[in-house]
Image (cartoon, grey):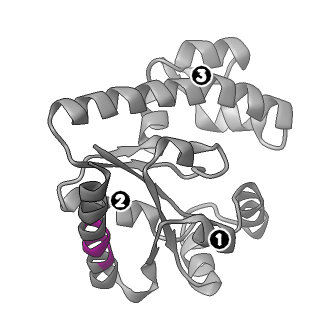
Amino acid sequence: MFILGLTGSIGMGKSTTAKFFAEAGVPVHDADAAVHRLYQGEAVAPIEAAFPRSTANGKVDRAKLAEQVVGNEAAIKRLEQIVHPLVRKSEERFLAEAERKGADVVVLDIPLLYETGGEERCDAVVVVSAPADVQRARAFERPGMSEDKFNKLLAKQLPDAEKRRRADFVVDSSHGFDAARAQVREILERVAMMKGRLE
């Protein structure tokens, strides 16, 4: 089974590109969605223990948690030590299930793939990219986005140029859905050839 990592900075169109892989029949594990599930399940008790009053009604209250961790490097690390292993477990279950069902290719959609060393678990990496002005315009369409928040998010992420340099494949998402979809199909064709060489 060929494992493709999918990543891209904020506003680059990564989530949309993940949908195109799913449309093409490729199982996709979305790390953000996994966190969302964990915040209503397994992660609730350990997060409440580490960050008292950050949960309510059996769920993590993201706003209350943010008050305790945003801008606090030690708190962010503590939160990551709780959440990352649980996301990895979810990823492992996903990979085992895909293998059982005989999937040829799977996608691991991980926002901070390079920043967390996730590329080591992948056979190849796809980076979704767009020019800076397109990225910025898209990011500012999100509710609650501010200059400060945008800059902080960028500061946490490896620069786009560096991601592109390290990628096996780049999807340029600035030319619309059809062009991005075509690039996804082309990547899957190339992966099929690579997979043939690996076997």
Residue 91 at x, y percent in the picture? 41, 33
Relative to 34, say whether 177 is above or below: below
The N terminus sits in image quarter: top left
Task: Give the residue number, with chain letter if any, for mark 2.
Answer: 18
Q: Position of residue 10 (x, y in %)?
A: 59, 64
* Magenta stretch holds residue 131: no
**Highlighted range, magenta:** 183-188
Q: Amino acid at mark 2?
A: Ala
- What residue is at 74 percent from the left and 54 percent from the top? 156
- Mark 3 and 2 residues: CB-CB less than 8 Å, in contact? no
Q: Nearer the viewer, residue 41 or 85?
A: 85
Query: Viewed as shown, does residue 84 lie left or right of 72?
Result: left
Q: Residues within 10 Å of mark 3 (few under 14, many from 20)?
A: many
Marks 3 and 1: which is nearer the front? 1
Q: Position of residue 175 (x, y in %)?
A: 40, 88
- 52 lies above or below 84: above
Of the numbered discs 3 and 2, the one sitting upstream in the chain is 2
Residue type, numbered disc 3: Thr
How far apart are labels 3 and 2 at the CA level? Answer: 30 Å
> Which badge, 2 or 1, comes first in the chain's sequence?
2
Q: Are marks 2 and 1 in contact (CB under 8 Å)?
A: no
Q: Can you identify the residue that label 1 sits on?
A: 160
Alpha carbon distance from label 3 to label 1: 34 Å
What label sits on residue 133 in the rendered view?
A: none
